[in-house]
Image (cartoon, coloured by chain):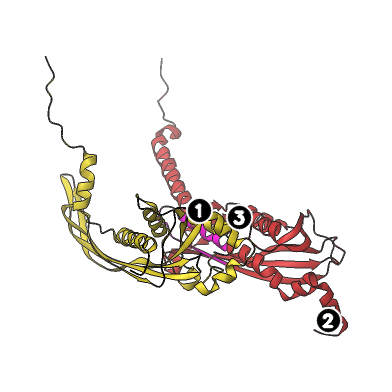
Chain colours: A yellow, B red
Amino acid sequence: MAARNLPSLPSPWLLAPLLGGLLAGCVNTRVEQTKNAITGIEAHESVAVLATSYHKGNATEVSFLDCVTEELDDGRDGLRVVGRRQFVDSLFPWFEPRTMPQKVESLPEMLSKPGVAEAISAAGVRYVVWVDGKTERTSEGGGLSCAASTVGGGCFGLLWWENDGSYEASVWDLRNGVHSGAVSSDAHGTSMVPAIVIPVPLIARTQTAACKNLANELKAFIKNEGPA
Amino acid sequence: MTLPPRTESPQSSSRPGQACRVALLLAAAAMTAACDQALTIPDQFPAPLVETLPLRVGVHYPDAYRDYTYTEAAGGDTEWSIRAGEANVAMFDSVCQRLFRETVRLDAPPAPGTATGYDAYLEPSIEAFEFATPGQSGTNQYSVWIRYRLKVYDRDGTLVTTWPVSAYGQSASSTLQPARSMQEATVLAMRDAAATISTGFPKQKAIRRQLLEPGTAKEADRNGSP
């Protein structure tokens, strides 16, 4: 007897992204840029993404820096991005939180230190992107209660919270020694977990949205020639 | 035949209860162990990009520096044990190898006031180590402060300076890996110290006068300058 082909159900793995998209919370984003100088990048040149110093109160998440680095490096239009630790180690101690340059005007002095210009040249770094900002919870509320008994259990209620991500990336052109401009990315996300028997998390990926917008704008900023 | 009355030994009657107690103790021990944090700081530090000074230097690491481990119960429930001795030595080695023309590690310190046989003799120590967890500071950061002290002697064994070096590092908290965050904050504090020493050593007034410009210092002494 020949086996009968039955229509197969979609794999749960294929359904997961669809479900995830449907169940994501709401995120509003805004991105802006200001350009001071002509930009552009050649194939052999690269970018370094660093956080501004925590001595100045900055607390940009490492996960955000990693995300921007990956997004800049991603795709056919991706830029060459050097690893953060590799760059900072090769220029130790001049990009440590205490010693890193605070203004573009201090670049010439830093580049005159023994071996610094050579190390930057060896890494092929044309632009340093200084990231400042963070994502924080701005409000939360609601309540959720769950109960279980011998015949079953369930939850009832609604939890919600809002996150704000606000980041600014200043772009320094090391070859020309100028502050090329800045790109800012703001994201506001509302997440909630409604529960009628089963809790359904609707999570807003605020930081990821801010990261992707910032990285896409940075790509255009660095690649485009002339003021935007 | 009369069988002796059957008795159960106390040991056999309490076996299930004892097993339960042992299991509870093991669970409690596992929970306690999960709260305690023991970490070793990695001993990899980059060499600084600084100008090499024309000095042949002897370095001695006291036992307290070489075997340094900081232990503290934070908030009374979690005991942190941070082993930083090997990293301390590696950090100072990497600074000295680039900062000085030649560095020799000494097993024992020269006798006080005797000629060292080197242009300078250095002895680092740790005076204080402090940290703050997110629970203590109310932020989402692990913070580490270290205060080093660097004693610098000249070739005659005369103390040139005792230089206090304050260092700070911070790292964002990771819910599942608190030890990693503390380790990162400690590494950043040690890098901060390395940066301060490698960039600040030639700028220290006493070092500049007595080690880097000794002719000028002797001239100033002859003229009665402070």
Of all chains, the one bearing label 3 is: B
Q: Where does residue A4 sit, x and y in percent of width and height?
A: 11, 22
Q: Nearer the viewer, residue A213 or A179?
A: A179
Q: Position of residue A86 (x, y in %)?
A: 53, 54
Q: Position of residue A148 (x, y in %)?
A: 20, 49
Figure check: A127 above or below B222: above
The circle drawn on residue B45 is 3
Q: Label 1 belongs to which residue?
A: B37
Residue A16 visible in the picture: yes
Question: Separation of disc 2 and disc 1 at Cα?
Answer: 54 Å
Expressed as whole percent of the image width and height from the top left, the position of residue A158 reads 19, 61
Mark 2 residue type: Ala
Q: Nearer the viewer, mark 2 or mark 3?
A: 2
The quarter of the displayed image where residue B56 is located:
bottom right
Report the residue that reaches farthest toward the bottom: B224
Of mark 2 and mark 1, the one earlier in the sequence is 1
Read off the residue under disc 2. Answer: B220
Answer whether residue A17 is magenta in the image.
no
Q: Amino acid at mark 3?
A: Phe
- Which image quarter is the N terminus of chain B in? top left
